[in-house]
Each structure stands twice: as C-alpha cells, then as structure tokens.
Amino acid sequence: MALSGVEIFKHLPKTNCKECGHPTCLAFAMKLAAKQANLDSCPYVSKEGKEFLSSASAPPIRPICIGHGDGSVKLGEETVLFRHEKKFVNPCALALSIDDSLPDTEILKRIDGVKTSEIERVGQKLRVEMISVGHTSSDPSRFSAVVKLIRENAPKIPLILNSKDPAAIESALPHCKGARPVIYAATKDNTEAMVKLAKENSAILGVYAEGLDALSSLTEKIKGMGLDDLVIDPGASTPRRMIEDYTMIRRSAIKKGFKPLGYPIITFTSSKDVFAESMKASIGIAKYASIIVLDSIERWKMLPLITLRQNIYTDPQVPMQVAQKIYKIGDANEKSPLLLTTNFSLTYFIVQGEVENSKVPCWLAIMDVEGLSVLTAWAAGKFTAPKIASFILESGIGDKVARKELIIPGYVSILSGALEEKLNSDWKVVVGPREANALPAFLKNRAA
C-alpha cells in the first residue's frame, strides 16, 4: 500500500525550509502521497529517509527508457487513471512489425516506411517510433541477420526483439550493444534464460503470461531475480479483453499500489482485417497501452491513430498555443494583406494552411489569448477591440504594410467599429470569412 501524507511526514526533516517549493514539510508530504511531487526536491532528507520513502515518491507505473540518444523512447511513469486529473506523462510508442521471413528488399522498404512516417500536426512532429523484429523464420541466424540489417539502416530506431526462443535472442543481441532493446518475451517456460540475457545486455524484458494472475506471479518472480525494467503483456487479443485487462492493470497499480502490475503494457494488434487492427490500436492508445505494435503503417491509417494519441497525451488544462507575433506567410511584402486570429494552435495552423493554399502572400497577426479559439476568447473578454488595437499598434506591423487594413475573423464582426476607433485613423478594419476554408477565395478576390 502507498504511504499516507502523515506517514511520509514522519520521515522528512521537518525544517519547513520551503526549498522544495512547498510552504511546509507537511504540504510536501501530502504532495508526495498524491504522486504530485518528487522526493529529490527535498535537499535535507536523510539517506535512511530517502531509502524508506523512495517507494512512496516513485510513480506507480515504472518509468522505462528504450533505445539510446535522440531516438530513445520513454514510457510509463504514469500517476493517474484519467487525463482530466493530470496530464499523462509519456505518450505511447507506435511500432511497425517486420518479420525475419520477409526478403531483404521488403525489409528495407518497411524500414524506410518507419523513417519517413513523420506527420506534422498543429506544430508537433509525430511519427512511428519503434520497430518490432518478428522471429517467424524459426532460424536464429536469419533473425540475427535481419536485426543486423535493421540496425545498419536505422541505428537510432529502438527495437523489440520478438522471439520466445532464447537462442534467437542471444544471436541478435550482439548487434544491439548499448541500444537497450526490448526482449519479447519471457514466459513461464523460458524465464531464467531470458532474464539472464536481459541483465547481461542491459535490455528491457517483455513479460508474457495469459491472464493477470499468471502475469503478476511471473513479474514478481523476475523482480526477485534482480530485474525490474519490464514491459508486460497479459495476452489480451480481443477488444473486450484489452479494455478489461489494461484497465485492471492500471487501476491495480495506481489505486491499489500493486507493484507486480506497475509496468508499461505492450500490445500486438495484428489482424487480417486492417480496420480491426486499427480499432485495436485505438483501444490500446486510449486504454493505457505503452507500446502498440502494428502490421502496417499506411498514412491513411496512421493519421487518425497519431491524432488520437496527440489529443490524449496533451495537457487538458493547458490549451495548445503558439507565440504571439506577426507571422510572414509566403513572400509577404508591404502590399500584402494583414489577417488577425488567436494563438490557439489548431486555429493558427488551420488558418495558416488555408492562407498557404490561396497562394497569396500574407501577414498573419497572432494574438495571445491564452490559447483560446476566436469565439471563446471573445466571450472571455480576452479578444476585445482595445486589446487587439494595442497588440497591432505595438507590433510594428504598421511600418511594414503600405495599405493599413486589418482583416478580422467574421465571427467577431461586431468588433469592427470599436476596433477602428481604437486604431489610428489611417487604419481600416475589414471583416473576413467566418470559416477558414473560405479564406483562399476571399484572398484571391481581394488580390484580383
């Protein structure tokens, strides 16, 4: 069981020094108990106290780092069940499965698919992060050769070595020195050999057992053997079991402090039906899986999955936003129109995209309204005529444009009169379209 705030307080120095960022040691203890603070923030806790309290301050889902350097992937470290309680910490990783029975030409093609999988959405670059090497050939030497081929052509991409045969894993590990791959999987039949390989090669061990009771017993056994960097798979193969098992794992770790299930989850979504595979991947993203292995990564399939992941792993209490400034789109000059909108990321990138589609160079004035959309900011009193006028006049854009016209979103046309009064007399306010998709036609008509 997790310690209470009062129990934690007994092992703190009780100096109330405030250096941890909290007003008292008791307040800090309460934050530790709620998994909202790190014990390292206290500079005066004793060595004995730190050892005793480390379990209380550690996140209920163990943090795991796979790979090395720029391409490494951090998983786990989660502290809540629902994203409205607190932002989820580490986004789940998407992986492409590459079987060693495929010809080298197809393997190279799939490696290239992972390397070029990046999709940019609302300013974030999103991609498939990992490769899972499947041992379907039953030949350890072929498995080793494929791992070598992948490492040579994609050295920064973290790997999952997917074989329950310790001999195959052992043959491939020399190509993964210092790369911290995932070895998948340890089962009740090969535990000793797999644990030995993981410890000797500083690898992450995937643990597979059918059902949560068998899985927790196996992770306890492996931890007793001195290995605690694990990812777990309860063998859920249907959507219903995925939801049930993954939810139970998360609840057991976070609500009950049950450490044998306090590890990141790995799931394989393979299906003959690509839409069924996508549905299982969506369940994995939404319901706590940390690694999701896919059979294919076509862009039409990945865009909704990556978008779902992005939405779930953003902070629901902090809107995504861009910096306040005047953005230059295309080869904007003194004759180019000036448009205004808010700094909500989605608004900015939609408007930017439509302006670029118009092929009309523009200046885009982005005003800081704490990441709210146009109507929300207006309703909240953050997108008003005096504030807009102050932003435009102080931005210096008046020195860059010959025609002092400010195009405002059509949804706030009510501001046009008051805004003209607040701006200098040589400024004119123009009401633009309500929807961003009408901007190309609007701008082309004005440029004609």
Image: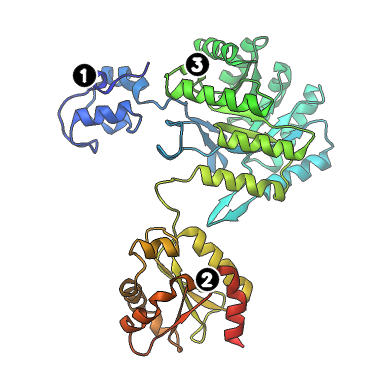
Look at the numbered disc 3 and give the secondary structure of its residue. helix
Residue at the extreme right: 103
Front tag of 2 and 1: 2
Left or right, 259 with respect to 267, comes to: left
Q: Are marks 2 and 3 in contact (CB under 8 Å)?
A: no
Instruction: Answer few, some or many: residues within 10 Å of disc 2's Cα (few below 14, many 20 plus, some between 14 and 19).
Output: some
Residue annotated with mark 2: 434
Q: Which mark is residue 10?
A: 1
Q: Earlier in the sequence, mark 1 or mark 3?
A: 1
Three-letter code for the amino acid on which mark 1 is drawn:
Lys
Q: Earlier in the sequence, mark 2 or mark 3?
A: 3
Camera sees residue 360: no
Q: Is residue 379 above or below residue 404?
A: above
Residues at marks 2 and 3, CA–CA distance in whole angstroms: 54 Å
How many marks are shown on the rendered structure? 3
Three-letter code for the amino acid on which mark 3 is drawn:
Pro
Three-letter code for the amino acid on which mark 2 is drawn:
Arg
Look at the numbered disc 1 and give the secondary structure of its residue. loop
Residue 291 spot, x, y in % from top left: 60, 33
Residues at marks 2 and 1, CA–CA distance in whole angstroms: 60 Å
Quadrant of the rendering where the C terminus is positioned = bottom right
Instruction: Answer few, some or many: residues within 10 Å of disc 1's Cα (few below 14, many 20 plus, some between 14 and 19).
Output: few
Camera sees residue 78: yes
Q: Which residue is at a point 56% across and 32% down the rendered structure image?
A: 287
Residue annotated with mark 3: 260
Q: Is residue 331 above or below residue 124?
A: below
Say which of 183 and 174 sits in front.
Answer: 183
Residue 387 spot, x, y in % from top left: 32, 71
Q: Are marks 1 and 3 in contact (CB under 8 Å)?
A: no
Look at the numbered disc 2 and give the secondary structure of its residue. loop
Q: Are marks 2 and 1 in contact (CB under 8 Å)?
A: no
Front tag of 2 and 3: 2
